[in-house]
Amino acid sequence: MKKVKEKYNWIVTILLIIGIVFVILLPLYMTVMIAIRDPGDMNNVLALPKMLRLRNFVEAWEMTDFPIKFRNTAFITVVNLVFTLVTNSFVAYAITRNRKKSKFFTMVYYYFVSAMFIPFSVLMLPLVVQANTFHLDNVVGITFLYVVFGMPMNTFLYSGAIRNIPEALDEAAKIDGANPIQTFWHIIFPILKPTTATVAILSFMWTWNDFTMPLVLLSEPNQQTLQLAQYVFKTQFSVDYNHAFASYLLVLAPVLVIYIFCQRWIMNGVVAGAVK
């Protein structure tokens, strides 16, 4: 009876894996097939194209002004990543180490965590008004807005990991003459590598793929990101699917490559940060 049950579980597991792989790979397959086929060969997008039309990628590159949009997106992503890792990790360290000593830091922690449950749509209109007032509706301004909006989740992840680090390390460093900043950067931060990898990868993917915040804040064409550039393929009455999907692949490629090579650190970091 046990062997029959194990065999049944094995079959169910295999079927689930096949189903999940199919669900994940089918949209990617359709994207590639549409991107490399001729506009006149759109009767069956699941079939192999009659002829490869790789020029779709060249034309999509030109239509989206890809180098400028890529520069803007890369600048926002990289600068946000650096400031996020530096500031959010130290804020989480300060909050976690002082929660037992002060109710103020406990309130700050729950304040950050509660911000995770506020939909961006609720903040969108006030954000636009404030961004215009303080001249943050540009590439530089939106970069630091990403740092602020990512702080609740990142603080939660970092705090969970820091709680697992014995405070005896801090006390030993203090005895040796280290101040809190030196203690953090030389002792605590290196131990947080799994969580830092998680925060870095998730922040990268979120910033690179985000469409809503650039849409409401970046109105100048030379300030727009790659995601906003996809609008060029849609008109009032039609959509240029072939060039659009070719452009999607160009935008997707960096994120896909980074995720494939770094997914192990994502899983390890999430587990390390979630366990108290």
Image: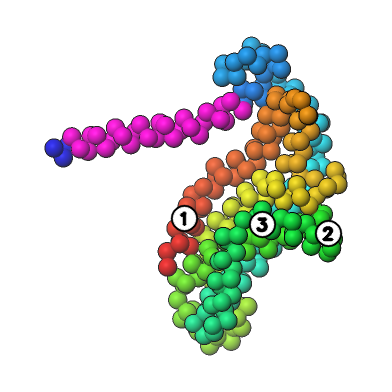
Packing grade of label 2 (10 A; few <14, some 14-19, many >=20) is: few
Give the Cα distance between marks 2 and 1: 40 Å
User: Is residue 194 highlighted in magenta?
Assistant: no
Task: Give the residue type at disc 3.
Answer: Val
Q: Main secondary structure of the magenta part?
A: helix
Q: Are marks 3 and 1 in contact (CB under 8 Å)?
A: no
Q: Residue at x 60, y 60 (%)?
A: 118
**Quick check: 119 left or right of 18?**
right
- 242 to 150, vertically: above or below: above
**Quick check: 166 left or right of 184?**
left
Lower position in the chain sequence, tag 2 or tag 1: 2
Q: Tag 1's secondary structure?
A: helix
Q: Residue at x 66, y 60 (%)?
A: 149
Mark 3 vs mark 1: in front: 3
Visible residue check, residue 79: no
Q: Residue furthest top?
A: 50
Q: Residue at x 54, y 82 (%)?
A: 103
Visible residue check, residue 107: yes
Residue on which the image places disc 2: 132
- 170 to 66, vertically: above or below: below
Q: Position of residue 15 (x, y in %)?
A: 35, 31
Marker disc for residue 122:
3
Residues in magenta? Answer: 4-31
